[in-house]
Image: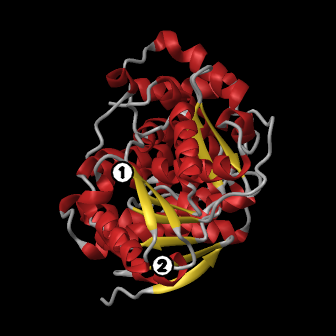
């Protein structure tokens, strides 16, 4: 089928979607004299996106500098360093080329360069964002959602936990969604990022803030992930699969921009804050099935609408909660996911610490849960992730 290119507006962001979408930033970058480019160590170069962006900047006569040290679950320390570099360079524009960690870091750095202070000041609510440098987000995964939302996450040093902030100033001016850049995404990252989008959909549709609009977006995301993730896993270069997974991630990102996430993301942020080597989507996949069991009991109609694509025999009744949970776990394992928290050094002895971190520092997410996120439920989620396989 024809893979149509298109543009939409999401929040304050203009999104250009399709093969060759990056060309749409040419007119925008010509307004600026100096740009700061933020990437991880290799993905931007390997995908070809950095080469394309550099060609546009050179053609426009824009001076630029590249920061290529963003790692998964970026620390507040790294974000603070990046913010200072952006400010010292005199950048008028920040360009993020990467997945969620890169885009989040660039957003926060754009605020720091404009408003001063440290990222901890904003996370701890000692300062509010006064503005941000304009941001272009060139997305290289089909999971983040950060390219179309107003949120960003960083890992604090003390306590070791990932916490996010939101600001209208952190919407990218432009988001670039080009599926050809995703063909170099490795198999494990293909899984992890698609799982992230899946849980964006599931949780956004079931927060206390949800709406028919968000549920419709979530259903569209889940339907495409279930259909196209197996195709992408079996053929990483399949451009049609990449197109629809990227589309699913985008609409799931718009969904969380409206209603956010709840228990699964809250607990995962506590865990990956303690171990930055844990991929966000992997943590979500370990925790998610147990959370779904509890949420399905409270909201079977909504979750049935989403999860029927995994198991058509599901019914929208609380009695099918366990069956729904098993369907989600079966989907993860069927894709090839074979991980648990023990592989990352966690044990039963860490359960109370993880739950306490989530309840103390991630209450903003937990408060949106459609059920009471009790210590017992959070601990059950953690222990199930410990023994996922």
150 and 285: which is toward the camera = 150
User: Residue 259: which quarter of the image?
Assistant: bottom right
Residue 301 in view: no
Label 1: state its secondary structure. Answer: helix
Of badges 2 and 1, the one in the foreground is 2
Residue 75 at x, y percent in the picture: 52, 33
2 and 288: which is toward the camera = 2
Residue 289 in view: yes
- Residue that appears at 32% across and 90% down: 2
Indicate whether 191 appears above or below 232: above
What is the quadrant of the C terminus in the image?
top left
Label 2: state its secondary structure. Answer: helix
- Circle 1: is it few (<14), some (14-19), or many (20+) Cα within 10 Å? some
Query: What numbered label is drawn on residue 331?
Result: 1
Horizontally, residue 192 falls left or right of residue 42, namely right
Horizontally, residue 139 falls left or right of residue 10, namely left
Query: What numbered label is drawn on residue 136?
Result: none
Q: Which residue is mark 2?
A: 25
Residue 337 at x, y percent in the picture: 30, 42
Find out whether the residues at labels 2 and 1 contact each other: C-beta distance under 8 Å.
Answer: no
292 and 230: which is toward the camera = 230
Residue 119 at x, y percent in the picture: 65, 38
Q: Earlier in the sequence, mark 2 or mark 1?
A: 2
Indicate whether 268 appears above or below 16: above
Residue 258 at x, y percent in the picture: 70, 62
- Residue that appears at 43% across and 36% down: 286
User: Residue 11: which quarter of the image?
Assistant: bottom right
- Residue that appears at 75% across and 32% down: 124
What is the quadrant of the N terminus in the image?
bottom left
């Amino acid at each position: 089928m024809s893979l149509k290119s298109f543009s939409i507006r999401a929040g304050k962001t203009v999104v250009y979607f399709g093969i060759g979408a990056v060309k749409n930033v040419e007119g925008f970058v010509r307004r600026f004299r100096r740009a700061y480019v933020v990437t991880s160590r290799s993905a931007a170069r390997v995908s070809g996106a950095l080469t394309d962006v550099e060609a546009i900047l050179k053609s426009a006569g824009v001076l630029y500098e590249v920061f290529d040290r963003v790692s998964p679950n970026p620390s507040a320390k790294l974000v603070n360093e990046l913010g200072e570099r952006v400010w010292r360079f005199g950048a008028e524009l920040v360009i993020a080329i990467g997945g969620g960690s890169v885009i989040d870091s660039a957003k926060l750095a754009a605020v720091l360069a404009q408003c001063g202070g440290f990222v901890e000041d904003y996370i701890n609510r000692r300062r509010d964002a006064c503005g941000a440098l304009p941001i272009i987000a060139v997305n290289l995964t089909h999971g983040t959602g950060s390219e179309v939302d107003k949120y960003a996450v960083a890992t604090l040093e003390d306590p070791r936990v990932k916490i996010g902030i939101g600001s209208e100033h952190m919407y990218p001016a432009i988001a670039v969604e080009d599926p050809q850049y995703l063909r170099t995404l490795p198999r494990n990252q293909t899984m992890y990022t698609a799982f992230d989008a899946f849980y964006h959909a599931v949780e956004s549709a079931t927060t206390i803030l949800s709406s028919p609009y968000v549920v419709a977006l979530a259903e569209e995301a889940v339907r495409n992930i279930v259909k196209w993730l197996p195709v992408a896993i079996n053929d990483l270069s399949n451009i049609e699969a990449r197109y629809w997974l990227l589309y699913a991630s985008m609409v799931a990102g718009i969904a969380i921009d409206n209603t956010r996430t709840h228990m699964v993301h809250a607990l995962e942020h506590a865990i990956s804050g303690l171990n930055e080597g844990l991929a966000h989507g992997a943590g979500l996949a370990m925790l998610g099935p147990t959370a779904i069991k509890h949420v399905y009991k409270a909201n079977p109609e909504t979750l049935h609408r989403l999860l029927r694509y995994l198991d058509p025999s599901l019914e929208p009744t609380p009695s099918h909660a366990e069956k729904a949970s098993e369907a989600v776990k079966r989907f993860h394992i069927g894709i090839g996911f074979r991980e648990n928290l023990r592989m990352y050094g966690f044990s039963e002895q860490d359960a109370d610490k993880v739950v306490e971190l989530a309840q103390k520092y991630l209450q903003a997410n937990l408060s949106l849960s459609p059920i009471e996120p009790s210590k017992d439920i959070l601990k059950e989620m953690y222990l199930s992730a410990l023994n996922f396989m």
